[in-house]
Amino acid sequence: MKDDSDVRKPTSTFPYGDYAPEKLQEAADRALDHYLKPEDNPSEPKSSAQLFTVSDEVDTEVLLANLSETLASANAMLNDLAFDMEGSRRHVLLGVLQIIELGALLADKALDRVEIRT
């Protein structure tokens, strides 16, 4: 008959020594926080699905001037296209042209009111 002193306990297969549940819980919490909790101060800017952006540093006068030029370009393109069309398609394009013209008038009036900074 064998006595209890001959019975060996199986050696731990845990690679970091004795099993310490509180230390494992702390490590698991840190790992989950790292991957799942949002950071208060993100080090990298968040990506956006927006393709184009306007810089916050651009002043209002430059924005309005570019808006006015963009509307003038859209007007010229649609005007050229509208006169190549006939029927209801032409009427639709002429309606869009009128909306662009109204937008251009508003942009130009706002541009007139902007104080020029020196």
Image (spheres, grey):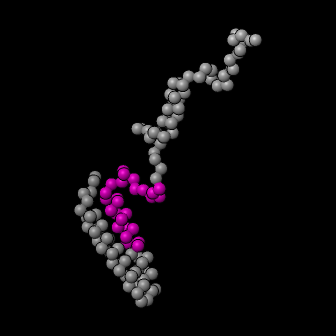
Depicted 47 relative to depicted 7: above or below: below
Q: Position of residue 48 (x, y in %)?
A: 46, 53
Q: Position of residue 61 (x, y in %)?
A: 31, 59
Q: Residue furthest front?
A: 1
Of residues 64 and 48, the one drawn nearer to the viewer in this rendering: 48
Of residues 63 and 96, the one drawn nearer to the viewer in this rendering: 96
Of residues 47 and 113, the one drawn nearer to the viewer in this rendering: 47
Q: Which residues are magenta?
A: 49-74
Instruction: Please give the name of the residue rendered at 47% of the width and 50% of the height, measured from the top-left corner.
Output: 47
Q: Residue furthest right?
A: 1
Q: Position of residue 86 (x, y in %)?
A: 43, 89
Depicted 32 relative to depicted 114: above or below: above
Instruction: Please give the name of the residue rendered at 26% of the width and 67% of the height, measured from the top-left corner.
Output: 109
Q: Seen in the image, is 6 located left or right of residue 83?
A: right
Inspect this view and state whether residue 44 appears.
yes
Inspect this view and state whether residue 42 appears.
no
Queried whether the magenta region covers residue 1, the answer comes back as no
The image quadrant where one finds the N terminus is top right
Q: Position of residue 103 (x, y in %)?
A: 31, 70
Q: Seen in the image, is 118 located left or right of residue 52?
A: left
Queried whether the magenta region covers residue 71, the answer comes back as yes
Depicted 38 relative to depicted 1: above or below: below
Question: Splitting the image into 4 quarters, where does residue 91 fall?
Answer: bottom left
Instruction: Please give the name of the residue rendered at 39% of the width and 68% of the height, measured from the top-left corner.
Output: 70
